[in-house]
C-alpha cells in the first residue's frame, strides 16, 4: 500500500537536530515505507522564515518527485512583507503549502495578519497546515474560528488536537468543510474515533518525521493493526494527500 506522509520536517539545528541533505532524508523516508512526503522547515519555525524557506527549497530541489515543500511566514512581521514572502515562496521557490505554528511563532489566531495570510494562501492554492493541540494559541476550535472566515482556503489541523483536544478537532471537522485532519501524534484509540466519526476523505497520515527518529514505521504498523478496511487506509495513507496536492 502506498503511503504519503503529510507532516514531515526538514532537519535544521533547532531542538537538538542535525542538518541532513535531501538525499539522506529521502533515503530514510523511502526505507521506512513512504512513496512521498509533504516537508516543512524546522528552523524556520524559530525565526528567519525567508532564509529557511530558501534552505528548504535548495535542500530538496533534486527530489520534487518525492517531496512537496511547505513554506512558512511570520504573522508578527509587517503584513505586506509577510504576504510578499508568501507570494515569493510560491513564485520563486515552488512551495505548494504553508505551515504555521502559533505556539512556536508566538502569535494568536486573532492577530490582524492571520486572516489576510489565510486568504492569500487560498488565492494561491496553498493548503495551510497548522500546528494545533497546544494551548493557549493553537487549539482546534481557535483555528476553526479562523477557518470559518476563509472557506475558500484548505485548513489542516496538523495534530488533530493531539490527544487531549481530539474531540474538539472532530467537532471542527464536522462544522467546517474546509478543515482536514492530519492524525500526527495521535494514539490508536483516538485514531479509531476519527475514522468512526469523521469523513474518511478528510483524514491524513502524518508522523513529524525529520523532527525525530524512527517515527514512520511504527506509525504505519499502528494503522495496519487497527483492523480498518483497506479502502479507508488507502484514503488516509495516500489518496487524500494526493487529492489535495497532486
Image: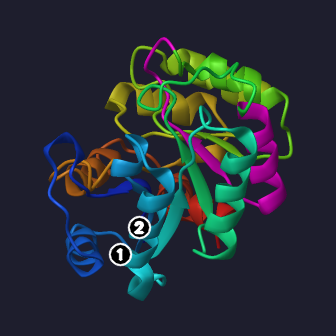
* Residue drawn at (64%, 47%) of the image: 128
Q: Is residue 219 visible?
A: yes
- Viewed as shown, does residue 151 lie left or right of 135? right
In percent of width and height, residue 67 lies at 44, 73
Q: Which residues are magenta?
A: 114-136
Is 125 within the magenta? yes
Say which quadrant the N terminus sits in. Answer: bottom left
In percent of width and height, residue 160 lies at 51, 31
148 w.r.t. 25: above or below:
above
In percent of width and height, residue 28 lies at 20, 71
74 w.r.t. 221: above or below:
above
- Viewed as shown, does residue 133 lie left or right of 244? left
- List the residue tagged with mark 1: 59
Mark 2 secondary-structure assignment: helix
Say which quadrant the C terminus sits in. Answer: bottom right
Mark 1 secondary-structure assignment: helix
* Residue drawn at (42%, 59%) of the image: 52
The label number, if any, that marks residue 221 in the structure image? none
- Viewed as shown, does residue 186 lie left or right of 211? right
Q: Nearer the viewer, residue 197 or 182?
A: 182
The label number, if any, that marks residue 56 in the structure image? 2
Q: Is residue 178 visible?
A: no
Q: Nearer the viewer, residue 143 or 177?
A: 143
Q: Nearer the viewer, residue 158 or 86?
A: 86
How packed mark 1 is, by other alpha carbons closer than 10 Å (few <14, some 14-19, many 20 or more), is some
Q: Number of marks in the image?
A: 2
In percent of width and height, residue 88 lies at 66, 66
* Residue drawn at (67%, 57%) of the image: 86
Q: Nearer the viewer, residue 83 or 209?
A: 83
How packed mark 2 is, by other alpha carbons closer than 10 Å (few <14, some 14-19, many 20 or more), is many
Rounded to the nearest angstrom, the CA distance separating label 1 from label 2 is 5 Å
Is 15 within the magenta? no
Amino acid at each position: 500500500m502506498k503511503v504519503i506522509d503529510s507532516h514531515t520536517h526538514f532537519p535544521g539545528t533547532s531542538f537538538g537536530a542535525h542538518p541532513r541533505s535531501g538525499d539522506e532524508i529521502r533515503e530514510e523516508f523511502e526505507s521506512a515505507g513512504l512513496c512521498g512526503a509533504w516537508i516543512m522547515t524546522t528552523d524556520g519555525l524559530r525565526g528567519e522564515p525567508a532564509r529557511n524557506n530558501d534552505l528548504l527549497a535548495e535542500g530538496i530541489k533534486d527530489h520534487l518527485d518525492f517531496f512537496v515543500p511547505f513554506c512558512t511566514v511570520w504573522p508578527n512581521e509587517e503584513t505586506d512583507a509577510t504576504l510578499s514572502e508568501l507570494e515569493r515562496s510560491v513564485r520563486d521557490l515552488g512551495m505548494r503549502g504553508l505551515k504555521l505554528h502559533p505556539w512556536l511563532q508566538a502569535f494568536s489566531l486573532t492577530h490582524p495578519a492571520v486572516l489576510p495570510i489565510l486568504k492569500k494562501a487560498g488565492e494561491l492554492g496553498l493548503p495551510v497546515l497548522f500546528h494545533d493541540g497546544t494551548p493557549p494559541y493553537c487549539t482546534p476550535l481557535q483555528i476553526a474560528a479562523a477557518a470559518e472566515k476563509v472557506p475558500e482556503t484548505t485548513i489542516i489541523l496538523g495534530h488533530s488536537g493531539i490527544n487531549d483536544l481530539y474531540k474538539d478537532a472532530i467537532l471542527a471537522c464536522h462544522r467546517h468543510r474546509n478543515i482536514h485532519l492530519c492524525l500526527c501524534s495521535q494514539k490508536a484509540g483516538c485514531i479509531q474515533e476519527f475514522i468512526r466519526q469523521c469523513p474518511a476523505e478528510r483524514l491524513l497520515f502524518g508522523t513529524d518525521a525529520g523532527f525525530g527518529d524512527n517515527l514512520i514505521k511504527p506509525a504505519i504498523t499502528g494503522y495496519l493493526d487497527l483492523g480498518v478496511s483497506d479502502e479507508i487506509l488507502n484514503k488516509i495513507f495516500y489518496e487524500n494527500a494526493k487529492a489535495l496536492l497532486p
